[in-house]
Image: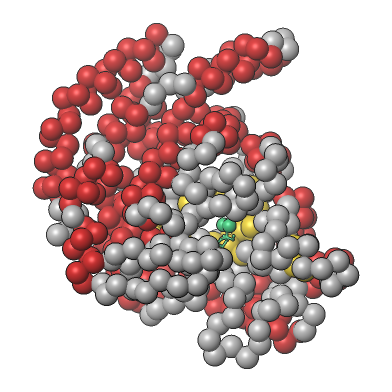
Amino acid sequence: MSEAGIDAGLIEKHNESRMEALRRDYEALGEQLDRRGIAIDAIKEKVAAFGVAIPSWGVGTGGTRFARFPGPGEPRDIFDKLADCAVIQSLTRATPTVSLHIPWDKADPALLREAAQRLGLGFDAMNSNTFQDHPGDRYSYKFGSLSHTDAATRRQAIEHNIECIEIGKAIGSRALTVWIGDGSNFPGQSNFTKAFERYLDSMRAIYAALPDDWRIFTEHKLYEPAFYSTVVQDWGTNYIIAQELGPKAFCLVDLGHHAPTVNIEMIVARLIQYGKLGGFHFNDSKYGDDDLDSGSIDPYRLFLVFNELVDAEKRGAAGFNPAHMLDQSHNVTDPIESLMVSATEVARAYAQALLVDRNALEAYQESNDALMATLTLKAAFRTDVEPILAMARVEKGGAADPVAAFRESGYRRKVAEERPAVAGGGGGIV
Ligand code: LRH
Ligand code: MN
Ligand code: MN
């Protein structure tokens, strides 16, 4: 095994047997795209430059409120998690960074930096956690954190966020994502206005500790863990927060954090238009915050989100620089495999969105030709861009078929020998 966990020779051998077919598929697609006035190599270059961050918490098996069924070779700590992330990166070449969650990933920053460097990884946004109590903390977050009625509890939550910034500074991160579970379970339990005022005050204190070259992302979520009201529940509230805090504050869109019928791509467009789109937590869902693999339920929606992103990229929208991160939980699949599939699906949506004939689309929009406008999007979405994704991967040293190569490597079996089995048990998202 190499430092990154997957032997380069194994990837080479894996690719060798697939290269001939891949070249032919790539050529055939190139010809087809050429007829549509699209240069396949230019799309491939864009895909090759695209990356999405791995959530450190994603490489462990998730769970539900009811149970957690750990798999073999579960990472024991952040260093095992980084090793797993490096495997994902070496096979997909689309996941160069990791997003840490504190205190889950708390460790000596010098060691974190050293491990990441050795594994060829960087760090994306830091995530704070005041949705659960931390061992040793004086105050409980049972009734809230940044919006808590008690000033000392709020102060503790503020300090925790500032500590996340400090750790992030030491390891080269440049953003903090704040998601809180604050809310209420019963009508009357909380004063909506006062709770939001307290939240904003707390966020102002965190914002004041943000270095000049950092961004702060606030993440909204409709419900859960609070079941009646949530302090940061939707993109409207989120936009207010970003406006109130200032130019370093942006909204983070987690695809699973919306009501089932909400038009997420339109929210994305609005946030871009007003310069407040900070980034994404990509995942998919059928019912709520299911944290399923990206594109596993509604790949068309993922494509439509990317359609907005490519539109903004093409017209050079002011301040447009969203962070791409995954945020998912795996109950029945191998987390490494699921994360590789998700990273590929996100890149696929990007590639498909790059194929949209934007001049034609604009003309159909201007002439109110609804049918042709929607078929223009469909033509891009229906294109099988797999040869582009695979070729970009292989040319960067990744695997033509990451899941197959991962299984060939025996990585999971090997780490299961070193990492003691973990007992299953009650609920909890991580
Ligand atoms: C909340 C959330 C948020 C947390 C993560 C573990 O549902 O999406 O991003 O930090 O899950
Ligand atoms: Mn999230
Ligand atoms: Mn979530």
Q: Where is residue 33 in the image (x, y as percent from the top left)?
A: 39, 15
Q: Is residue 30 above or below residue 134?
A: above
Looking at the image, which is closer to me, 29 or 290? 290
Q: In this view, does 81 lie to the left or right of 238?
A: left
- Relative side of 46 to 260, left or right: left
**Would residue 243 be visible to someone looking at this image?**
no
Residue drawn at 33 percent across, 58 percent down: 85
Q: Residue at x 82, y 68 (%)?
A: 186
Q: In this view, does 413 lie to the left or right of 165?
A: left
Task: Name the quadrant containing residue 147.
Answer: bottom right
The image quadrant that residue 214 belongs to is: bottom right
| Colouring method of the image | secondary structure
| Residue plotted at (38% across, 49% down) | 338
At horizontal 77% and vertical 50% (from top left) the residue drawn is: 236
192 sits to left or right of 89: right
The quadrant of the image that shows the N terminus is: bottom left
The answer to whether 388 is drawn above or below residue 336 in the figure is above
Query: Do we see residue 315 in this rendering?
Result: yes
Residue 287: x percent and y percent? 62, 47
Across and down, in percent, residue 256 comes to 60, 49
Please say if 51 is above or below 58: above
Counting labels gives 0
Q: In which quarter of the image is ligand 3?
A: bottom right
Q: Position of residue 294 (x, y in %)?
A: 48, 44
